[in-house]
Image (spheres, coloured by chain):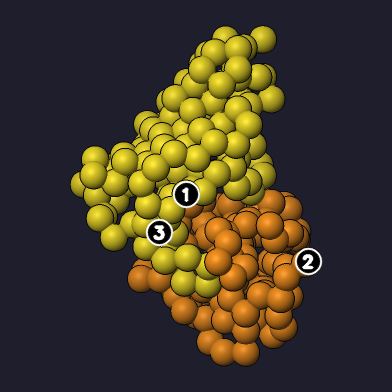
Chain colours: A yellow, B orange
Amino acid sequence: QKEVEQDPGPLSVPEGAIVSLNCTYSNSAFQYFMWYRQYSRKGPELLMYTYSSGNKEDGRFTAQVDKSSKYISLFIRDSQPSDSATYLCAMSAGYGGSQGNLIFGKGTKLSVKP
Amino acid sequence: GAVVSQHPSRVICKSGTSVKIECRSLDFQATTMFWYRQFPKKSLMLMATSNEGSKATYEQGVEKDKFLINHASLTLSTLTVTSAHPEDSSFYICSVGPGNQPQHFGDGTRLSIL
């Protein structure tokens, strides 16, 4: 079993839809959870980060972490064509300079159709 | 968050050439920077941790003599792919993890070895 599993998609939705992106993981030591957005031929851009279990909301984005189930989610409300990108989940046991061991999912490619 | 600049964005060269990639932290003095590699449809994989003023720490399976890392100042780390071959063609991305913040990434370097 891989440390982080993420459905690669592609996922296609109409503009305005609610998008749900998910990752599962196997390492119970993970405490820090991140979602990055990556446009084609660009580096990952940090969207959300959370510590331990719980929810975090930022504008149209909501991140959820359920450590008991080893499951994290990213919800995008009122999706826009500009949200079309690959979304990567990432997680680690440490933070900051000790966060080198950042484990990524493969990414889910999202396409929002106007 | 940290602003990371990576150069060049694209390199195409012949097999056997050595290629140097620069990663600059523009607004943060980084004692530690990270180098990742991303193959098509695969996860970002950490290659090495670059430490200012000391040797880099390489992940298992990454040849330190092939991927030379120099972190001579608090704002610059370089990755040199020595005697590059077609199998080294990939997307190389650096990141900075300032203090207790998550990692922020550069825009990556797409390396193509002919």
Residue A82 placement (x, y as % from top left): 69, 25
Q: Secondary structure at mark 3?
A: strand
Mark 1–mark 3 Cα distance, whole angstroms, equals: 11 Å
Mark 3 — residue?
A92
Q: Residue at x 73, y 59 (%)?
A: B3
Residue A56 placement (x, y as % from top left): 50, 40
Residue B101 placement (x, y as % from top left): 58, 62
Q: Nearer the viewer, residue A62 or A47?
A: A62
Residue A31 placement (x, y as % from top left): 37, 57
**CB-based contact (under 8 Å), mark 2 and mark 3:** no
Mark 1: few, some, or many residues within 10 Å (few <14, many ≥20)? Answer: some
Is the C terminus of chain A in the top left, top right, bottom left or bottom right quadrant? top right
Note whether residue A41 is visible: yes
Compared to residue B7, the image places residue A18 above or below, namely: above
Mark 2 — residue?
B26
Mark 2: few, some, or many residues within 10 Å (few <14, many ≥20)? Answer: few
Q: Nearer the viewer, mark 1 or mark 3?
A: 1
Mark 2–mark 3 Cα distance, whole angstroms, equals: 25 Å
Q: Residue at x 47, y 79 (%)?
A: B57
Note whether residue A10 is visible: no
Answer left or right for A59 relative to A13.
right
Kind of residue indicated by mark 1:
Thr
Query: In terms of image quadrants, where is residue A7?
Result: top left
Kind of residue indicated by mark 2:
Leu
Residue sitting at the far right: B26
Compared to residue B113, the image places residue A14 above or below, namely: above
Q: Nearer the viewer, residue A5 or B39?
A: A5
Mark 3: few, some, or many residues within 10 Å (few <14, many ≥20)? Answer: many
Question: Could you confirm whether marks 1 and 3 are on the same chain?
Answer: yes
Answer left or right for B12 relative to A95.
right
Q: Disc 1 is attached to a residue of which chain? A: A
